[in-house]
Amino acid sequence: MALISWYMEIQKSSFSNLNELKLRFPNASIIGDDRVIFNIIGNDYRLITRIIFQFKTIQIKWFGTHEAYDQIDVLTINPK
Protein backbone atom coordinates (compact mmCIF):
# COMPACT_ATOMS: atom_id res chain seq x y z
CA MET A 1 0.00 0.00 0.00
CA ALA A 2 2.84 2.41 0.79
CA LEU A 3 4.37 1.99 -2.67
CA ILE A 4 0.99 2.68 -4.26
CA SER A 5 0.65 5.81 -2.09
CA TRP A 6 4.09 6.98 -3.26
CA TYR A 7 3.09 6.34 -6.88
CA MET A 8 -0.18 8.26 -6.53
CA GLU A 9 1.62 11.20 -4.92
CA ILE A 10 4.29 11.29 -7.64
CA GLN A 11 1.69 10.96 -10.38
CA LYS A 12 -0.32 13.98 -9.23
CA SER A 13 2.75 16.13 -8.58
CA SER A 14 4.66 18.34 -10.94
CA PHE A 15 8.29 18.88 -10.03
CA SER A 16 10.54 21.04 -12.17
CA ASN A 17 13.77 20.31 -10.33
CA LEU A 18 15.34 18.50 -7.40
CA ASN A 19 14.70 21.37 -5.00
CA GLU A 20 10.95 21.16 -5.61
CA LEU A 21 11.07 17.40 -5.20
CA LYS A 22 12.90 17.73 -1.86
CA LEU A 23 10.22 20.11 -0.59
CA ARG A 24 7.59 17.38 -1.01
CA PHE A 25 9.86 14.43 -0.13
CA PRO A 26 12.44 15.81 2.34
CA ASN A 27 13.79 12.33 3.19
CA ALA A 28 14.63 11.53 -0.43
CA SER A 29 18.34 11.08 -1.08
CA ILE A 30 19.77 12.56 -4.24
CA ILE A 31 22.73 10.71 -5.76
CA GLY A 32 24.52 10.81 -9.11
CA ASP A 33 23.10 9.98 -12.55
CA ASP A 34 19.79 11.76 -11.80
CA ARG A 35 18.95 9.08 -9.25
CA VAL A 36 16.80 9.66 -6.22
CA ILE A 37 16.30 7.17 -3.40
CA PHE A 38 12.98 7.15 -1.58
CA ASN A 39 12.32 5.47 1.76
CA ILE A 40 9.13 3.42 1.64
CA ILE A 41 7.46 2.44 4.93
CA GLY A 42 9.96 4.46 6.89
CA ASN A 43 13.28 2.76 6.38
CA ASP A 44 11.99 -0.77 5.70
CA TYR A 45 12.14 -0.52 1.90
CA ARG A 46 14.10 1.54 -0.59
CA LEU A 47 13.05 2.69 -4.05
CA ILE A 48 15.75 3.84 -6.46
CA THR A 49 14.52 5.99 -9.33
CA ARG A 50 16.05 8.01 -12.13
CA ILE A 51 14.22 11.29 -12.66
CA ILE A 52 14.55 13.34 -15.82
CA PHE A 53 12.75 16.59 -15.03
CA GLN A 54 13.10 17.96 -18.57
CA PHE A 55 10.98 15.10 -19.95
CA LYS A 56 8.84 14.60 -16.81
CA THR A 57 9.99 10.99 -16.67
CA ILE A 58 10.57 8.72 -13.69
CA GLN A 59 12.27 5.41 -14.26
CA ILE A 60 12.20 2.84 -11.47
CA LYS A 61 15.65 1.30 -11.24
CA TRP A 62 15.25 -0.91 -8.17
CA PHE A 63 12.94 -1.68 -5.24
CA GLY A 64 13.70 -3.84 -2.25
CA THR A 65 14.29 -4.15 1.46
CA HIS A 66 16.75 -1.98 3.30
CA GLU A 67 18.84 -5.10 3.91
CA ALA A 68 18.99 -5.91 0.18
CA TYR A 69 19.72 -2.23 -0.57
CA ASP A 70 22.85 -2.45 1.56
CA GLN A 71 24.12 -5.20 -0.77
CA ILE A 72 23.99 -3.23 -4.06
CA ASP A 73 25.80 -0.36 -5.71
CA VAL A 74 23.04 2.23 -6.15
CA LEU A 75 24.59 3.73 -9.29
CA THR A 76 24.84 0.44 -11.15
CA ILE A 77 22.33 -1.74 -9.26
CA ASN A 78 24.98 -4.46 -9.17
CA PRO A 79 26.04 -6.44 -6.11
CA LYS A 80 28.89 -4.91 -4.13
Image: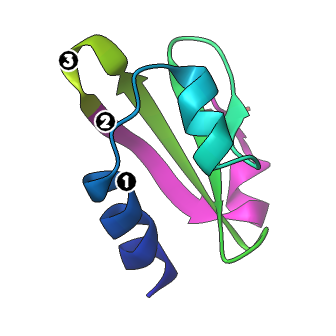
Which residue: 39% across, 63% down? 9
Q: Is residue 4 above or below residue 49?
A: below
Asked whether 14 or 38 is in front, the reply is 14
Q: Amino acid at mark 2?
A: Ile
How crowded is the residue under tag 3: few (<14 C-alpha within 10 Å), some, or many (20+)?
few
Instruction: Please tell me in which quadrant of the rendered image residue 79 appears.
Output: top right
User: Where does the magenta region start and end?
Assistant: 58-76
Q: Is residue 36 above or below residue 7?
A: above
Residue positioned most to the left:
55
Q: Amino acid at mark 1?
A: Ile
Q: Is residue 72 magenta?
A: yes
* Residue 25, numbered label: none
Asked whether 50 or 12 is in front, the reply is 12
The residue mark sitting in front, 3 or 2, is 3
Q: Is residue 22 left or right of residue 3?
A: right
Q: Amino acid at mark 3?
A: Phe
